[in-house]
Image: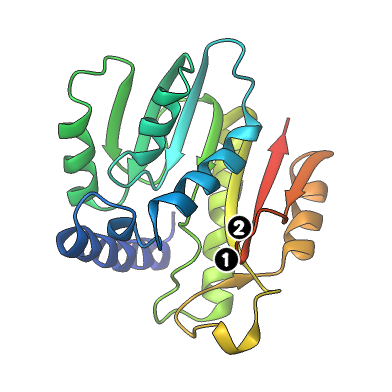
């Protein structure tokens, strides 16, 4: 990871630590509008996994562990590792799941082991003061990492460039879903699905190995 990326991630860590301090362990604490849309995103990402048997999953940008809450309610058999660059988020998640032997949380942006699947929800949205080019480089670097560590596939979501222009904010990153679909098809796998029909101004990309 480059020094520039480390600097970027430090900025992201400060941003989300402040959100957690302001809103607590809620959807707003990880910069989502409400819990309902948060769960809707999780359901799109989890179309990646084959839940008829045990699997391992890395949650990149795990926050306080809301995805693991949802997976537990679905009764999946999962060994979970949550990564976040915010130490405050990781501390909160560790406290919440201290009694779960199949979950661990690390202050990191890359897992220390291979997993079946990796997912990233919301980590590409808030670019703060970074340029479009800087943020795109960070996004692709992260996707390359997820591809390297995931033996069965990975999934992520982004705000869509098809959003209503008058509602778009300069501090947010709106990705071109068609461009990312082409990148994923040519760079990672022939088995790629683009989900852009679930009622939010965003899309989810599913990449299966």
As drawn, is 32 to the left or to the right of 121? left
Look at 51% across and 42% down and name the residue there.
42
As drawn, is 161 to the left or to the right of 43? right
As drawn, is 86 to the left or to the right of 132? left
Colour treatment of the image: rainbow
Look at 33% across and 64% down and name the residue there.
12
Tell me if residue 179 comes above or below residue 50 in the rendering: below
Residue 206 location in percent, x, y?
Answer: 69, 42
Residue 98, by quadrant, is top left
Tell me if residue 63 comes above or below residue 124 in the rendering: above
Image disc number at residue 140: 2
Residue 31 location in percent, x, y?
Answer: 36, 62
Q: Secondary structure at mark 1?
A: helix
Image disc number at residue 137: 1
Image disc number at residue 180: none
Q: Quadrant of the N terminus?
A: bottom left
Kindly check if marks 2 and 1 are in contact, taking CB atoms under 8 A apart as contact: yes
């Amino acid at each position: 990871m480059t020094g520039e990326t480390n600097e970027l991630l430090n900025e992201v860590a400060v941003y989300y630590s402040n959100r957690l301090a302001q809103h607590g362990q809620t959807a707003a604490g990880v910069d989502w509008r409400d819990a309902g849309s948060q769960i809707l995103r999780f359901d799109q990402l989890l179309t990646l996994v084959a839940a008829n048997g045990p699997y391992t999953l890395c949650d990149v940008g795990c926050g306080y562990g809301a995805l693991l809450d949802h997976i537990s309610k679905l009764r999946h058999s999962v060994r979970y590792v949550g990564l976040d660059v915010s130490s405050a988020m990781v501390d909160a998640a560790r406290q919440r799941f201290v009694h779960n032997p199949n979950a661990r949380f690390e202050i990191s942006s890359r897992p220390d082991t291979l997993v079946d699947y990796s997912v990233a929800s919301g980590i590409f949205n808030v670019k703060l003061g970074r340029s479009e080019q800087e943020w795109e480089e960070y996004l692709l670097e992260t996707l390359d990492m997820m591809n390297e560590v995931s033996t069965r596939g990975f999934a992520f979501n982004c705000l869509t460039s098809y959003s209503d222009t008058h509602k778009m904010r300069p501090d947010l990153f709106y990705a071109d879903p068609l461009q990312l679909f082409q990148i994923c098809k040519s760079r990672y796998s022939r088995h790629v699905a683009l989900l852009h029909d679930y009622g939010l101004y965003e899309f989810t990309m599913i990449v299966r190995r």
